[in-house]
Structures are given as C-alpha cells and as structure tokens.
Amino acid sequence: MDFPYIVEPRRDTGLYNAKLGIWLFLASEVMLFGALFSAYVLLRVGAEPGMWPHGWLNVYIGTANTIVLITSSITTVMAWVSCKLRQYGRFKFFHALTILLAMTFVCIKSYEYHDKFTHYEITLANGKFADGHLVERSKDFDLAKQTGSVTIHGYEVEREVELMDMQRPEARHIQREEIIIPAAEIKKLERYGPWHHTYLAIYFTLTALHALHVVCGAVVIGFLWGPGSRMWKTDPERFTNRVEVSGLFWHFVDLIWIFLFPVLYLL
Amino acid sequence: MADSVSNIPLHHDDGDGHREHDHPEAGFWRQYIFSTDHKVIGIQYGLTALCFMLFGFFLMLLMRWQMAHPGQPVPVFGWLLEKTLGQVAARGAMSADLYNSFGAMHGTIMVFLAIVPLAFVAFSNFVLPLQIGAPDMAFPRLNMASYQAFVLGGVIMLTSFFIPGGAAQAGWTSYSPLATMIPTDGQIFWLVAMVFIITSGLLSAVNFIATVIQLRAPGMTWMRLPFFVWAQFVTSFLILLAFPPLEAAAVMQLMDKVAHTSFFLPTGLAVGGQYANISGGGSPLLWQHLFWFLGHPEVYVLILPAMGIVCEIIANNTRKPIWGYKSLVYSVLALGFLSFLVWAHHMYLTGMGTKVALFFQTTTMIISIPSVIILTCFLISLWGSSIRFNTPMLFALGFLPMFGIGGLTGLPLGFNISDVHLHDTYYIIAHFHYVVAPGTIFALFAGIYYWFPKMTGRMMNEFWGRVHFWGSLIFMNVVFMPMFAQGMAGMLRRMADGGANYSSAVNSKAGAEVIGGLSNNIIELHTWILWGACLLGVVQIPFIINLFWSIKHGKKVDSDNPWDATTLEWQTATPPPHTNFPEAPQVFRGPYEYSVPGHARDFTPQNEPPK
Amino acid sequence: MNDGRSPEPAHSVRGYIFVFIALLAGTFLTVWASFIQFGSREINIAVALTIASVKAFLVAAYFMHLISERKMIFCVMGFTALFFAGLMGLTIWSTSPDSMVHIQHVP
C-alpha cells in the first residue's frame, strides 16, 4: 500500500504530513516557552519592590541579534521560494546566509554570556557593595585565607537596591573606574551567573534554551544544505517540503526571540 | 518517510505468522530491535512497559511490608536490598529514606514508565493505524526514535537507585524546595530521565495526531472512527500541550539543583538550621502550578485510552452498537478541553483565596459531567444485550464499577471544603488507585487478551484468564478499599512507619484510644492490605505465564477475525503484513454495526461493500 | 501555498520584503519606545508587548504562511494559544497577593 501525503497534500486538510507534524510540534514548543514566560512573570511580580533588575543587558547588542534573526528569517523564506521556483543555486545561496546568520547569533550570545560571567557583585565587609567587571586577581588571591586582592572596573554603592535599576536616568552618570579590593574587605564575591538573581536564572534558562533551538535548527538546515540536498535530484518537490518544514521551525525560533528581546532586554 | 519498498503491493498472509515480502527479509536487528513498523514498536513499548509495571509493583510490595512491620527486615528480599543498596537497607530493613525513594519511584515508574507507555503508546501504536486503515504511523522513523528515548529515560531512572544518596525521594510530585535540598544526585537523574520521557511522549503525540488527521482510509470520516481512536486522539492532544510545561519546570528544577538558581526556592529558606546560600526570590508555588498543569491532564491521559479499549470490547461482546456514540465523542472532546482548567484542585491547601478555589472547584465539578456521560453510555450499552463473557469482556465489565468507585470518591476531593480534611491522606491514594489500578489496568488487561490473537494468531488461555480476572478483582479491592477508611481517619500519605507515630498505641498509656490518633483497627488494616497485595501479585503469575506460553502454544485462531468484530484491524491478515492492508480499504459505515436487522450475520465490517 | 506545485511565490517575494522591512521598523520602534518614560512601567510593557505581537503576527501569517492555511492548523494553534493563556493567566491570578490567604500573626 502506498504511503500517502508525503509530498502531495491531503484534500480536506490542505496539508502534507510533515507540515502538520511540524505545526503540532511547534504547538508543544509554544507551551514549553509559554511556561518559561509564565515563570518570568511570576518571578518578577513576586519580587520585592525595587529588587527586580532593569537594564542589566546591553540593548544595542540585543538589537543587533534581533536584526540578525529577522534577516535569517527572510533568507529562509527566500531559500524556500527558490526551491519552489526550482532555482537550486539561489536556494544554496540563501540558506548559506541563514546558517552564517545563525552562527553570528550564537557568537554574539556567547559574547554576552562571557560578559555576564566576568561581571561581579562584591559584598564588602563594611556593608557596602562594589560592582564591576573583573580586571585581574592578584596571584595570591584567596578569599578563604583573606590574602591578595581583586581589581574590578566598576563602582561602589551603599545599598544593593542601587544595583538593580540601571535604566534610571542617574545610572547614565555612574563613573566606573578601576578599584582594587583586598580580600580582607570582601564578605562575598559573586558572578552575574544564574545563581545570582532569579532574573539572571530565567534569562540564562530562556536564552540558553532558545540558543539550543537556534543550534538545532541550524544543524537541520545545514544538513539540508549539505548531504540532504541529494534529494533535490531524485524528488525535488519532497525536498522543497523539507525546506519548508525546517523553515517553519526556524521562523518559530525567530518568533520566540521577538518576545524574548523586549521582555528581557527592554522592560 | 516510509520505506520506499512499501509502494509494492504485498501478498496476503497465509495465517500462521509467516510473511511474504517482495523485498529481501530484514535482519533480526532491523526487524525486531530497530524496526520502524508501528506493530513491532507497539509490542516493544508494551513489553517494556509491563516490565516497568512489574518492577513498580515490587517497590510497592516492599513499601507495604514496611508499613505493616515498621523497621523489621524484609523477608526473602531483605538480603538482596542490603547487598545492592548498602547502608540504607542495613540488616535488610528499609530506612525511612529508602522508603521515601521507593515511594517516589513507584509513582513515577507506574505513571510515566508503565501506564502511559502501555495504555497510550503501545496500544495506539499497534491498533490505531490498523483501525483507521493506514499503512503505518505518519512518521515511522520518529516512532522508533520515540521508543529509544523512552528506553533511555527508563534506564536513567533505574540507574538512579544505585548512586550514592539513592533515587529521588521527594514524591513523584517532586515538590521544591525539598526535591532540591535533599542531598542526593538521584533527583538530577530523575529530572534528566523525565526530559527524555517527556520528549518521547511528545514525539509520539505528534505522530498519532498527524496519523489520525492525515492517514484515515477513504470513507473513514471522523464520525465513523472507532471510539478507541477518538480517545487516543484526545489523549495525544493532552500530552502534546500539557507535558511541555512540566519539561520547562524540570529544566528549572535541574537549574536549581545544578546551577544553584532559585526558581523555586524562596528568600529566607533555611536548610538544616542555617540559611541556604541562594539568591532567593523564587516561588515553590510556581513548581506546583507547572507540575499540576501537566498533572491533571496526565490523569486523563491515564484513563482515556482505557475508556477507548473498554468501548471496543463492550461493543464487540454485547453484539450491539455502543449506545450514544455521538455523546461519547463530544464528551471526550469536552473532557480533553476542560482538563486543562482544573489543575489547582490539587493545590487547595496552598493558601489560595476563596475566589480562586471557587473557580477551580467549579471547573472540577463541571468536568465530572462528561466522565459520567461516558460511563453511563457504556452501562446503557449493556442493557438488553447478549453478553459474551470471555476474558476481555470480564475485565471490561470489571472496569465499569471500579472506575465508578474511583470517580465517585473523587467528588469530595473536588470540593475545597472536604478536600481540606482529605488532602494528602490515604483517601486520596485509594481514590486514584481505584481509577488507575482496578480501573485503567483492568482495561489494559482486557485489551491485551482482546488483541493478542491479532498479534500472534493464537488465543490466550481462557481458564487462566478468568483466574487472573477474579483474583485481581478480589485482591485489588482488598488492597484499596480499606485505604478509604484509613484516609478518613486521618492517616497521612508517605509515612515510612505506617502511621505508628500518630497511633493510639504509641501515644497513649496502656494503648487506650487517643482522640485524633490512629486507632488500632486502622493500623491493623495494614496487615490485610499487605496480604491483599501479596496475593494480588500471586494471581499475576498465571497472566505472565499465559502471555508468553500462548505465543507459541495458545489455541490457534480459525480466522483473521476470531471475535467477529467490525473494526478494520480484524479485516486484514494475522498478524498484519508490513503495510497492513494490500491496498487502502474503503470504509462504508460506522464502527459498531452489530446485529443490524435484515443482515445474515450479526456484524458487518466497516469495509464490507454495501449490497 | 497549499497546492504543491504552483509557482505563486514569484508574486509573494515582494510581500516578503515588505514584511522584512516592517519587522526591522518594528524593532527600531520598540527600542526607541523603551527609552521613553511613559509615566508608569505598565505602559512601557503594554507598548512593547503590542509591538512584539504585531511582529509575531507578521512572521506567523506571512513567513509561516498561516494566512493561507486552512482550518486544521488554526484549530491546533488556536487551542494552543488558549491553553497558554490559561496557564499564564490562571497561575498568575492564583498566586497574586490578593488571591492568597495571609496569616495574621497576633503580636
């Protein structure tokens, strides 16, 4: 018995099997990311007043990444259109762009992650707080033994709450300079990792899961661009459907970022 | 995505299990281990799930011993526990931590590794494509991948017993902060395994939905689908949309454990008398909401396939159409929809205000209506019928009152005011076990006895089937009925000492009854329950033997349709060949055309051309 | 786009470019709007989410061809959207301070 609707769509649904399959999968992904967004809202609403951070992420870098993904979305559509018009060369060109843009996105994200992991909040012995990026640690630095010192490029504040809202007008005038802090004055030294604040926890979780989807999507598109493109010669319509299905996944990845960007970077 | 060779029409099977192929026979590994054929995958899922069910059963037996004889070495198996698990099972007795880990794992294994894979995936896989006249599932290779992810998840779960600190110990519900703060990596194994199992389930759900929508044979309209297919279709949607929030929550709890985040850990959390070194700001309630958002649809995932199976068997053995087919379909759709809106009735004691409790209470009461409609349709279907009392029908009939008890005892739990008294007591355990154990599991047994001849060409032994049924029915009730009494008397769940700490015997001088304490009668029920559980295990032995023995030595069927059934799976060879039907069947009528006046036979298959 | 072989896409390329430009414009708009102090945080949130929703609609409707799909996909995504709303809405409502019971400590 022939396996129906792999290439030609079924009349009453207007769909071929894989297209329905990917949409169903995307529905489950909406619920997955939806749960994480719900978690974000709950954590933010439940935070102590004033203690939810704003402006901890670089808006310009985030905007750049948004433009990268939007561009990759149009190149994905164009790759599919090229397949439909049986223009194999243009398909290769557009999806090569898509893959490059995906890699660009991941690189920019890695830079952002690195930036966070070199950013420290230091609770001082005198009850104040120092905050900045690590310049260097002295060779003999040991917090437990209270020897040595760290040098950060940052500033000091009286209360922790002053570190939260970096979108307030005063924040623009903060002078950052190199500060050397001896280990004896440090009560606690903590990086801006996911453990540092629930905002960072949900930021890292959401963006890492999203980046994982970017990587997987890029791998699939890469496979279709490379070894998978053999099917173009034997069954171009079925190949075009595969390009469409992977494109749908890719657009979904872009969709998630369209919400992630304002929620995490702007608000 | 199917084998290209399946374009070639296949010859009819000659009836005793041999298959003719127009392409070279696949090797053992491709045919039985790495198969993409839905029938093979269905059997793989079924056997694996039954193994997990047996293992989960053993965990329960050990727990029941501990409850009836707290602190005493487990007979027969005590030495084995000590040998494999070490200090936690010192002298062969279960420590409280070990009891807790068995409890958490019993629940997890039974729900996610036994019932869902068997009721939902295994039965769907084998039966669904056949019943709609399809050559296979829409995505056969994805189907194989689903099974592999399931096995991987199961292996990780089982491995967690043997790591230092032991398996997860915070209940199958894995509430934070306890789940995060117990010093064992078993929780990490649990969370990682859950991610694999959930992914496996999601992929299966995508496959089943796409198959039902796209691959129905010509003439198989929506309202001609067997109710089994409708039930599995709705179940697939529940899995598709309800599981991901738990996956998200599992990732977050994993972050809490591994990356020391505070998603579910509140500010000011103290562990072992000291403030925990965490950022705080998290919400334990968030975990509960995300867990139960799945947790409630999950229980309908456990029951809907069972209802589907029971419907097929009742129609077939009453030789009458099912009463109220349309009501059944609309009820199951309503049930699926409503199941997403009731979850917080598992959280009445978390400090929710009256408005919230009222909302969830109302939706919970409304959802009982479609359930009752479905059960009522089945009961009315029995009226005036000529019942054939074979083993599948006995189990299907047994399902009805057992599910009835389970469902009715859920009503006081749906009301906030009575749930305050009954929450987290043994009443709850009795309630949900009645629905799943003599409920769903009976339906699954029925399905196995019913479809066994289609899989193997032989019948299972009828006498031992009846022994299995009567024994299971009696001992299930011996085990679970007393728990209602225990729960109403206030015995809480998850107590490693069986409630001894709260008993009158321990808390009063001369063992006199203490008001609010657990009376001796209540505590003594543990002994009854232990005996019931052991004997319940004993009567499963003939089933296990019957299952394997009958594959080679059971009575051979005399036709492809030994039950004289109307649905499409019985209108093809036994076992069905590689693409199920030589060519796509044409469907002319509904699924339950039994005893139609004016016809010579008392059944008319769906694909028989009209005269 | 549900007929497998029609060469319709030639016309739609212009449409896709329009959508692309609209998405870029939306991005710049939302960033610019985030620097404006609207008075309360809530308004900023509403503005940002509205712009994001419009962008999402454009991607879904045109890049993902939803606008030319038939009922089946709409049903699936419609129910999904409903349940997502239910998850978020009911969870937040249930845990908001007004909905919770607070224990008063007697001093």
Image: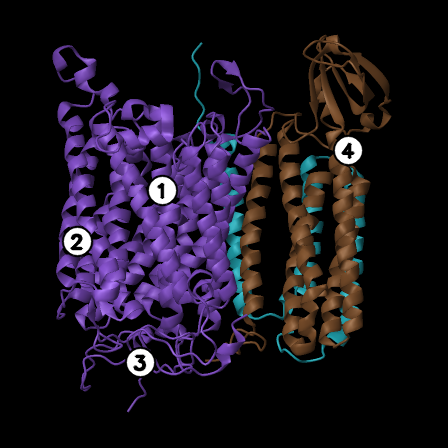
Q: Which residue is mark 3?
A: B14
Q: Which chain is cyan?
A: C
Q: Position of residue B341 (x, y in %)?
A: 43, 48
- Mark in front: 4 vs 3: 3
Write the residue at 74% across / 77% down: A86
Q: Earlier in the sequence, mark 3 or mark 2?
A: 3
Question: How many angstroms separate mark 4 from mark 1 (CA)?
Answer: 48 Å
Q: Which mark is residue B585?
A: none
Question: How many angstroms separate mark 3 from mark 2 (CA)?
Answer: 32 Å
Give, as a three-letter code, the residue at label 2: His
> Circles 4 and 2: CB distance less than 8 Å?
no
> Circles 4 and 1: CB distance less than 8 Å?
no
Question: How many angstroms separate mark 4 from mark 2 (CA)?
Answer: 65 Å
Write the residue at 36% across / 71% down: B131
Q: Which mark is residue A115?
A: 4
Viewer can see residue C26: no
Question: From the viewer's perspective, is B4 left or right of B513?
Answer: right
Q: Which residue is mark 1?
A: B361
Q: Secondary structure at mark 1?
A: helix
Viewer can see residue B212: yes
Question: From the viewer's perspective, is B524 left or right of C71?
Answer: left
Q: Which chain is brown?
A: A
Q: Tag 3: Cα neighbours inside 10 Å, few (<14), some, or many (≥20)?
A: few
Q: Secondary structure at mark 4?
A: helix
Q: Which residue is mark 2?
A: B468
Q: Tag 2: Cα neighbours inside 10 Å, few (<14), some, or many (≥20)?
A: many
- Colour in which chain B is shown? purple
